[in-house]
Amino acid sequence: MTRQTFRVGITRDALTPSGEPICGRAALGILDVPGIEWEFLPEAVPELTPEHAARYDALCVLGARVTRRTVSAPDCRLRLVARFGVGYDTVDVPALNERGVLLTIAPDGVRRPVASSVMAFMLAMAHRLQEKDALVRTGRWSEKGDYLGYGLAGKTLGVIGVGNIGREVFRLVAPWDMVHLGCDPNVPQSAVDDLSVQMVDMDTLLREADVVSVNCLLDDTTRGLIGARAFGLMKPTALFINTARGPVVDEAALTQALQEKRIRAAAIDVFQQEPTPVDNPLLQLDNVMVAPHAVCHTDECMRLVGESVLRSAVELFNGRRPPHIVNAEALGHASWGGKWHK
């Protein structure tokens, strides 16, 4: 190995149990560039270590945490952490900034798949698919008249977090002729006029929405954002969807709201603890639909995300600024020598 070799490591959780890359083998061809050596890490780890940071120029990361300890050693070689997805609550961004390590995400890969997942959850709950499935499996066809679904035309969809995914949800739901409400302190009304979205405060959205979809990032301002007070403001007929991050929602408050029928139903892809314990009270309820933080995982999603992540590494190797950088502050580190302007 020469000094010029650019080394890329991919966390082992980006392999399926059968050993296939989740992004597909074709996507890995992006790394077949002279001067780049790449490999999957030899074992799955919950947290990347200083040894990983000393071995690789770029790390493509799915679930493993990247902490201050990861980049703490003097021999840290790491220049890029490329995340499979858009959330980066498992990455210590200030620590990366201090060492001049870039963090990139893959918004183009998840935009449509996650928004499609929100639609799938909403339609499944509106048509009461779980309950109707149970009727057939238990021979209770005569009860089907008791399980009418809910038409969506004229109903109100409220999206909390009107960013990359939230906007796509509004685009996809347009044919259902719903009223569109959005809540996001970082999005002005003018930015969503083309989507017929009315930006409102949180309380207004919760009171008026028939369907509430959480699509915001997890940070200090959103942790525990949806709790008992929020569920108390919602309609008793409301449908609740969380495909963002588990800790955005107070899970105990959600469980109680569903148990007491203060909201009609929920669809949850993310949990406060993952994997969630099988004795989680939420899993005992018949008015909740759940998925293992994978409802958006399709061949399309994994391929697009993988291509975005791997291209970030190649761009950096070629001396170009990668797209979708989260922490432009890192570019001010002395190690970059003013190569790119912020």
Image: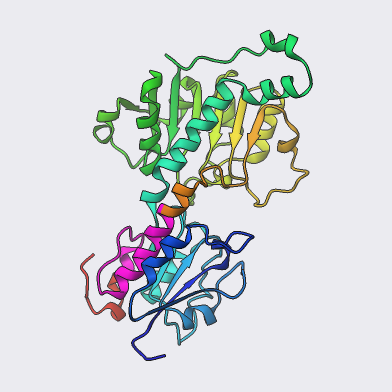
The image's colour scheme reads rainbow
* Residue name at image x 35 percent, y 63 percent: 327
Q: Is residue 205 left or right of residue 145?
A: left
Q: Is residue 212 left or right of residue 319?
A: right
Q: Is residue 328 left or right of residue 133?
A: left
Q: Does the magenta segment cover residue 61?
A: no
Q: Residue furthest bottom?
A: 2
Residue nearest the viewer, comparing 186 with 309: 309
* Residue name at image x 53 percent, y 68 percent: 11
Image height of 240 relative to 68, above or below? above
Q: Quadrant of residue 130?
A: top right
Horizontal and vertical percent for residue 92?
48, 65
Q: Does the magenta segment cover residue 306?
A: yes
Confirm whether residue 102 shows in the render.
no
Residue nearest the viewer, comparing 182 with 78: 78
Residue nearest the viewer, comparing 101 with 130: 130
Q: Quadrant of residue 142?
A: top right
Q: Residue furthest front?
A: 26
Dominant secondary structure, magenta: helix
* Residue name at image x 38 percent, y 18 percent: 177
Horizontal and vertical percent for residue 294?
57, 47
Horizontal and vertical percent for residue 111?
39, 44
Image height of 209 relative to 108, above or below? above
Horizontal and vertical percent for residue 33?
34, 75
Confirm whether residue 115 shows in the render.
yes
Residue range in magenta is 304-330
The C terminus lies in which quarter of the figure? bottom left
The N terminus lies in which quarter of the figure? bottom left
How many discs mark residues in the rendered view? 0
Image height of 182 relative to 269, above or below? above
